[in-house]
Image: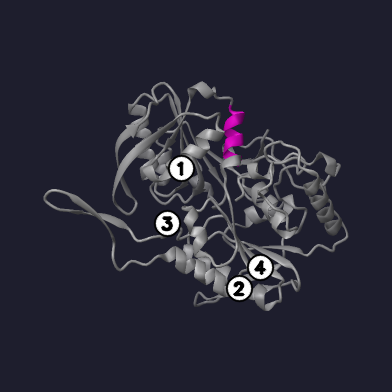
Amino acid sequence: MAFLLHAQPSHSLPAADLRRPSPLIHRGPASVRFPLRCKAVDSYGGNSDDLYLLTGDTAPASALLSRTRLEDAIKNNTTRLRIFSGTANPSLAQEISCYLGLELGKIKIKRFADGEIYVQLQESVRGCDVFLVQPTCPPANENLMELLVMIDACRRASAKTITAVIPYFGYARADRKAIFHMTFPFYKLLQTQGRESIAAKLVANLITESGADRVLACDLHSGQSMGYFDIPVDHVYGQPVILDYLASKGISSDDLVVVSPDVGGVARARAFAKKLSDAPLAIVDKRRHGHNVAEVMNLIGDVKGKVAIMVDDMIDTAGTISKGAALLHQEGAREVYACTTHAVFSPPAISRLSSGLFQEVIITNTIPLSEQNYFPQLTVLSVANLLAETIWRVHDDCSGDIEPFSTLGID
């Protein structure tokens, strides 16, 4: 079961019932039903014995004890957990804090006339575990700098630990030097592009040197980016949220095929297909001639008469995924769904995605979406529960790799 929420932010914070957490669904204003209002006291209603995970499995005794300690700390106002939000995605930070039964920390962020950023914490964080929720989404440089200044403010305020919660890690695609083809009369040679920066490593260094003790990221573009950090990185995946929603649609497993829009996403699509009733896999082969430009060549696999689920970590200009969808229709696919965690949606993504190629475009709220970017086929799922569960485990020193916690997609 999933809850439908207001697409526009309101004074009442949206959240799901803690005892049976499920992905929150945001839709455009025209399709909103059953609006839900958050009450912090409702988050911890009921007995801790009825705690469930995102997958519906009953949590083990260790998790129940940890949850009870957190409940008691919040009730007695003795918790050392603090959550602050930057200006990039405050609605997601509100959902996270409401899920945990906490109030967002008070923080003052402003820009001077010359564009410089000013940050002041308006409550004490001395000896606290501080979590700063700030995706480095567009405008990437502004949001990144704001995160760095927030981290520095917490460090100078004597926070015990500082965790940068980065739902979307900007510059993640700049994780290596580009590879290009050198053509000779009788062969082609692969060679790396010279004199290029590896910005993902630079950004990792900036976050580390600013004073962060830990990073919590969601669906990094490439897993090896975790190695760029010299501090612990908790990497969570948005797959459980999307899988739960797809399962609720009741599509027959015999009709499904999971499609990777490019060769680089095969591992991601294979893992997705395995969890989706072990569905068959298809791959779109493409050739990229420049940044944000893609050309589809052919299809590997059979999609005729099937419901194709295209899976990717992000959609930027939607060139790759829209050309892939057109190819799938040419090959006889009955319906095409697009699933992605990060909706960057740079122009002309909206016109491409709303052109009728897709039955539904399923994204998450790691990046805030403006109202003018909604279109009828769009569904937005919330990863607030997923991030909140991870924050709770980090704060309570509870591992995320013990079954059934591994079903949350936490590394």
User: Going by the picture, which residue comes out furthest to the left?
Assistant: 185
Which disc, if any, is residue 267? 1
Q: Residues within 10 Å of mark 4 (few under 14, many from 20)?
A: many
Q: CA distance from mark 2 to mark 4?
A: 7 Å
Q: Could you tell which of marks 2 and 4 lies nearer the N-terminus?
A: 4
Q: Are marks 2 and 4 in contact (CB under 8 Å)?
A: yes
Q: Residue at x 56, y 34 (%)?
A: 275
Q: CA distance from mark 3 to mark 4?
A: 25 Å
In the displayed structure, 221 sits above or below 286; it is: below
The stretch of residues the image draws in magenta is 241-249
Residue position marked by numbered label 4 in the rendering: 162
Residue type at mark 2? Gly
Residue position marked by numbered label 3 in the rendering: 173
Q: Are marks 3 and 4 in contact (CB under 8 Å)?
A: no
Q: Position of residue 23 (x, y in %)?
A: 64, 41
Q: Is residue 103 left or right of residue 88?
A: right
Q: Residue at x 44, y 24 (%)?
A: 306
**Residue 254 appears in the rendering:** yes
Residue type at mark 1? Ala
In the displayed structure, 214 sits above or below 179; it is: below
Give the mark toward the camera: 2 or 1.
1
What element does badge 2 sit on? loop
Total of numbered circles in the picture? 4
What element does badge 3 sit on? loop
Q: Position of residue 90 (x, y in %)?
A: 63, 57
Residue type at mark 4? Ile
Residue position marked by numbered label 2 in the rendering: 211
Q: Could you tell which of marks 2 and 1 lies nearer the N-terminus?
A: 2
